[in-house]
C-alpha cells in the first residue's frame, strides 16, 4: 500500500461489464471522475465511527455539532460505516455490502452525508453513491473509512467503536438486524487487524487514536509508533468536548 491523497485524485476507470468470448475475457470500462471536493481545512480532525458497542458511550449528536479550536473555528469530520445511517448522518458513509447498499439507496436521503461505495454498487444504483478511490476489495468498511480519512488529508484520526480485535462473539451495535450476523456469531477479526496495521504503517505522519478501547490493542498495532489509546475523558479533553 502506498500513500494516496484526494488532492492528487482526478478519478479512475472502473469495469462496468465483463464478457467471456471464446474463452477470452473482454472488459468494458468507464471513467468515473472524482465527485467529492472534501476541503479538510475547516476540520480539526477526523472521527471514524465503527459499529462496536463502545461507540454508543458518546452520542453522535455531540460529535456532529461540536466546534473546537480558537473561537470554534474547527469541526470534527465524521466517517461512518454501513448501518450507522439508521441512526445518524455522518459527513461520509462507507458501504461495501450489496444488500446494505440497496437498503441505503432505498431508505436514506441525506443532504449532508456523502455515501461512498464500490463501482458495482454505483452501477446498480445510479446517482446514489460516490466511488471509493482505489478500492481494495479485501478491506472492510471500518478500514476503508480510516483509509479515506487519511486519503482526505487528516493528520489526526480518532477511532471509535473499534471493538473486535480477536475471535469473539459479535460485538456490534447492529447484531441481529438486517445485513448483520447474530450476536452469538464468532467473529474472526484477524484480516481487519492486518488491514488497519497496513494503514498505520503507510500513513506514518498520521496520529491514530483508539478511543475507549474494548480490549488491549493487537500486538501488531502496539508496534506502530503513530498509534495510541485513550479513554472517554482523555478524548473529551483532547477535542474540547
Image (cartoon, rainbow, N blue to C red):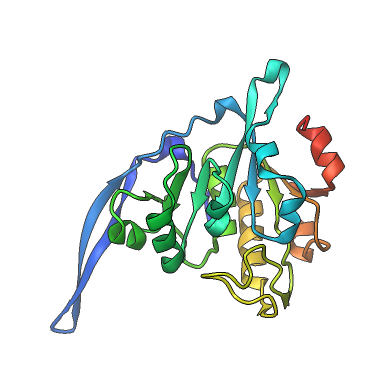
Residue 160 visible in the displayed image? yes
Foreground of the two, 56 or 150 = 56
Residue 155 visible in the displayed image? no
Farthest residue, direction top: 71
**Residue depicted at 60% across the width and 42% down the height:** 78
Q: Does 238 appear above or below 215?
A: above
**Residue depicted at 42% across the width and 55% down the height:** 107
Residue 158 location, quadrant: top right
Q: How many numbered dots are placed on residues in this image?
A: 0
99 displayed left or right of 206 = left
Give the percent coordinates (x, y) of residue 14: 30, 57
Give the percent coordinates (x, y) of residue 110: 45, 42
Q: Does 169 appear above or below 108?
A: below
Foreground of the two, 123 or 24 = 123
Give the percent coordinates (x, y) of residue 119: 34, 58
Farthest residue, direction left: 22
Quadrant for the C terminus, please. top right
223 displayed left or right of 205 = right
Farthest residue, direction bottom: 23
Foreground of the two, 180 or 106 = 106
Give the percent coordinates (x, y) of residue 91: 53, 40
119 displayed left or right of 89 = left
Amino acid at each position: 500500500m502506498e500513500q494516496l491523497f484526494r488532492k492528487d485524485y482526478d478519478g479512475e476507470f472502473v469495469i462496468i461489464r465483463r464478457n467471456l468470448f471464446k474463452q477470452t475475457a473482454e472488459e468494458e470500462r468507464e471513467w468515473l471522475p472524482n465527485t467529492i471536493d472534501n476541503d479538510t481545512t475547516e476540520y480539526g480532525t477526523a472521527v471514524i465511527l465503527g459499529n462496536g458497542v463502545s461507540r454508543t458511550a458518546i452520542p453522535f449528536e455531540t460529535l456532529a455539532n461540536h466546534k473546537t479550536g480558537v473561537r470554534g473555528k474547527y469541526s470534527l469530520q465524521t466517517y461512518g460505516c454501513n448501518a450507522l445511517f439508521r441512526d445518524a448522518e455522518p459527513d461520509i458513509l462507507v458501504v461495501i455490502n450489496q444488500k446494505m447498499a440497496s437498503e441505503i439507496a432505498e431508505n436514506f436521503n441525506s443532504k449532508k452525508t456523502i455515501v461512498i461505495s464500490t463501482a458495482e454498487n454505483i452501477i446498480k444504483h445510479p446517482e446514489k453513491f460516490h466511488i471509493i478511490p482505489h478500492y481494495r476489495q479485501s478491506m472492510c468498511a471500518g478500514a476503508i473509512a480510516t483509509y479515506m480519512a487519511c486519503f482526505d488529508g487528516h493528520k489526526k484520526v480518532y477511532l471509535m467503536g473499534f471493538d473486535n480485535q480477536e475471535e469473539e462473539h459479535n460485538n456490534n451495535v447492529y447484531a441481529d438486524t438486517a445485513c448483520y450476523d447474530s450476536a452469538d456469531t464468532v467473529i474472526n477479526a484477524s484480516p481487519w487487524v492486518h488491514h488497519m496495521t497496513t494503514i498505520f504503517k503507510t500513513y506514518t505522519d498520521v496520529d491514530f487514536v483508539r478511543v475507549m478501547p474494548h480490549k488491549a490493542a493487537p500486538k501488531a498495532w502496539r508496534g506502530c509508533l503513530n498509534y495510541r489509546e485513550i479513554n472517554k475523558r482523555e478524548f473529551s479533553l483532547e477535542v474540547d468536548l
